[in-house]
Amino acid sequence: MFQSFEVTARPEQGPPRLRALRAELTVEGLDGFLVPRADAHQGEYVAAHDDRLAWLTGFTGSAGFCCVLHDIAGVFIDGRYRTQVKAQVAADFTPVPWPEVSLGNWLKEQLPAGGTVGFDAWLHTPEQIAQAEDTLKGTGIILRPCVNLVDRIWVDQPAPPMFPAKAHPIEFAGETHVEKRQRLAQSLCEAHQKAAVITLPDSHNWLLNIRGADIARNPVAHGFAVLHDDATVDLFMALSKLDDLRPHLGDDVRCHAPEQFLDLLQTLGGPVRLDKQSVPVIVADTLGDVAVWGSDPCALPKACKNAAEINGSAQAHLRDGAALCELLAWLDQQPAGTITETQVVSRLEAARRKDNALQDISFETIAGTGPNGAIMHYRVTEETDSELQDGHLIVLDSGGQYLDGTTDITRTVAIGTPPLEARAAFTRVLAGMIAMSRLRWPVGLAGCHIEAVGRMPLWLAGQDFDHGLGHGVGAYLSVHEGPQRLSRVSQVPLQPGMILSNEPGYYREGAFGIRIENLLVVREAPALSGGDDHRAMLDWETLSFAPIDRRLIDVSLLDAASLSWLNDYHAQVAEKIGPRVSPVTKLWLDSATAPL
């Protein structure tokens, strides 16, 4: 299996590691040290070698950081993880609600007499450090680059990943890397910039049409790249990863060992573009005055998928939907109290693995039943594995990495007879998901302008959820992709070709969780017949197809337009997925998609 259920971190491991780290603070003459989730490439996902936050604290969420002082260790976590962190960290660590409480303000409270806090300049961005330093002005608190103290005490730290990279076929990429390099180099020329530094693995992997296996569940190869205004690239990647790629890359992509990265940066003439949100501090410090701030040149082109990428994603979702339906049909036949979360995860992965295009799952499958469903990013282990009991809801959030696309879909399923309050909350979540799916909006709007549409039915009932409505998704790349998001903080205008999730939810700690998720692609909206306003509009095309549990829907809470959308969607599920499933599952599917 791709997924295992072993316990990867335990709360009791944290305190002795914390004591060892504090001893190093004394050796270095520091008052504190920052331990981020990030690695040197500043992506969301990290390899085992770089999973310092989880190793130190036990917290395994995909965002957050720890600030270790001599008398307190704050674990900064956002709303997605405030239930999870309680179970994962020892009492020696103090959860801090972030971003409500910023690092700078927390340090001012904890170090009123001032002090020096160390950080690894490879693991933080200029934007992060600048924000904290701005808050700390005049306090006597200094942030100072230093050696990585966690690496010093982590005696059995895994080695950096060294998996070979591979070429991504043009039939799936839709554009050669020569064309991509030339297109992006032209944008550098127009900005009068000589080069751009690219540290995000999914960015330079997309640019060069390569994929790898250096991060679990994400098909990327670690490295750094410099794109020049003449369309050449200097690629810094372990040369052993590139043995079979030289013909694919060609002469205009110069390959170097990663150890040469900073040395080459010192030879560059400016201006050199850096993205302050994704390059490490040490890169900006090395470039000095030749650096100029700007966006990652790959980010927006990568987000706007071409026709081949959209078609590949659509096909991957149809096959993935069929696998999910096989699982849901099986699940519906199991009596309450007879199966567990790990059995559901294993059965779903087995269904997906029948597709030869599957390379991996796209993240650890979330299968949380009952109270576990309220843990937004729950990962079932051998110790937490729970039976699906009568009256439970199970949140099943999963996806696959296929050669032609990345999938991510969530369904919440009733086990036995669901509570009435759960049905009401589920229907409100569904109403929000449908409202976003039906939306048309003027060109130029960003996720922050429309995200509330998916929350409104919950808001009207005094309910909400503590995660964004949706994230970008890559094309056989990272399942979480920027810069596009459906979030109240996202300022990036949505453009045709962007793929995003639409996933409202509701979570009642200790009782149940609800989330419903489809992936959508932005497209130019067709003109409305009889309309007299001819402004350009955008809307969505749905990519995900699987039934939504009719037993959890209170039809009286849906308006006529929402009910019509749901029945039409279920008709499409039956049409598109029905021919792809087994006869037994086809019978179940016909019932699961019957009109309400």
Image: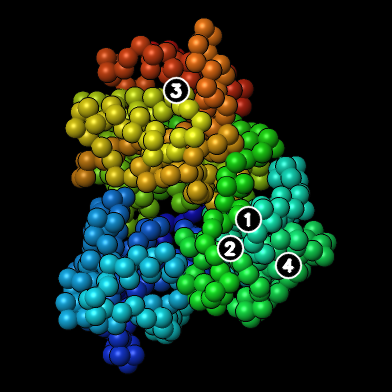
Q: Determine which residue is flagged by label 4.
A: 242
Residue 73 percent location from the top left of the image: 24, 73
Residue lying at the far top in this picture: please name it: 530
Residue 158 seen in the figure: no
Label 3 Cα neighbours within 10 Å, binned few <14 / some 14-19 / many ≥20: some
Instruction: Judge depth for marks 3 and 1 and give the one in front.
Output: 1
Q: Please, what secondary structure does the residue beneath circle 3 have?
A: loop
Q: Determine which residue is flagged by label 1.
A: 191
Instruction: Judge depth for marks 4 and 1 and give the one in front.
Output: 1
Q: Amino acid at mark 4?
A: Leu
Label 2 Cα neighbours within 10 Å, binned few <14 / some 14-19 / many ≥20: many
Earlier-in-chain disc, 4 versus 2: 4
Q: CA distance from mark 3 to mark 1?
A: 38 Å
Q: CA distance from mark 1 to mark 2?
A: 10 Å
Residue at 71% x, 61% y is 229
Kindly identify which numbered label has been placed on residue 273.
2
Q: Amino acid at mark 1?
A: Ala
Earlier-in-chain disc, 3 versus 2: 2
Q: Are marks 4 and 3 in contact (CB under 8 Å)?
A: no
Residue lying at the far bottom in this picture: please name it: 27
Residue 150 percent location from the top left of the image: 39, 79
Kindly identify which numbered label has been placed on residue 513.
none
Q: Are marks 3 and 2 in contact (CB under 8 Å)?
A: no
Q: Are marks 1 and 2 in contact (CB under 8 Å)?
A: yes
Kindly identify which numbered label has been placed on residue 438.
3
Q: Please, what secondary structure does the residue beneath circle 4 have?
A: helix
